[in-house]
Amino acid sequence: MSIAPDLAAAATDLLAAMRARGLRIATVESCTGGLIAACLTEIPGSSDVVDRGFVTYSNEAKSELVGVPADLIAAVGAVSEDVARAMAEGALARSRADLAVSCTGVAGPGGGSAAKPVGLVHIACASRDGTQHRQLLLGDLGRAGIREATVAQVFDLAHEVLAGRT
């Protein structure tokens, strides 16, 4: 697999920051389909930082693998802040990681609506100190562009959470 150079650099930076603090990470992904974990594990030596990854593309997988309540998904939809937060918190609870990152969104080209257009993505980063969320309105960058932009934003959010840790 060929990872874009900017994503490889961002993954390398995140791994180094986590390694320096003795921390581990878990990923739980929907719209990126495992790309976050792939970028991290593309970097040699990542196994001391990457604990595990969950690809929860279906609503059932979100519930079964990371404990997102099915009634929450039914109430607010899979592409929502609440579900992104629940995904990250569920991955944190079901791993040995210190941080868990998540994403859920509409990568397109179809599947969007007026309320949830193509390019809408919710990301979250959970730690033992709490959960941070970011809503992305990426626009229609194409499927690959949305997925790659999401990965970059997830790495950025993880750095932000790390910066807030003592």
Image (tube, grey):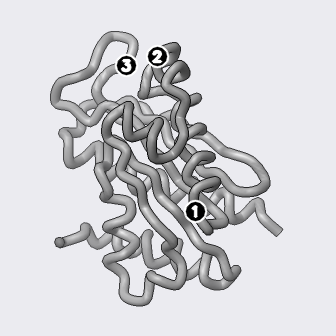
Horizontal arrangement in the rendering, residue 135 relative to residue 89 (left or right): left
**Distance from the alpha carbon under mark 1 to that under mark 2:** 26 Å
Quadrant location of residue 30?
top left
What's under tag 1, amino acid-wise? Ser
Q: Position of residue 17 (x, y in %)?
A: 61, 77
Identify the mark nearer the N-term, 1 or 3.
Answer: 1
Q: Position of residue 46 (x, y in %)?
A: 44, 82
The secondary element bearing badge 3 is classed as loop
Q: Position of residue 115 (x, y in %)?
A: 39, 12
Q: Which residue is mark 3?
A: 116
- Observer-side mark, 2 or 3, equals 2
Contact? badges 1 and 3 (CB < 8 Å):
no
Horizontal arrangement in the rendering, residue 145 relative to residue 43 (left or right): left
The residue at the point 48 percent across, 53 percent down is: 154
Depth check, front residue: 144 or 61: 61
**Distance from the alpha carbon under mark 1 to that under mark 3:** 30 Å
The secondary element bearing badge 2 is classed as helix
Q: Which residue is mark 1?
A: 95
Q: Which residue is mark 2?
A: 74
Contact? badges 1 and 2 (CB < 8 Å):
no
**Distance from the alpha carbon under mark 2 to that under mark 3:** 15 Å
Quadrant for the C terminus in the image = bottom right
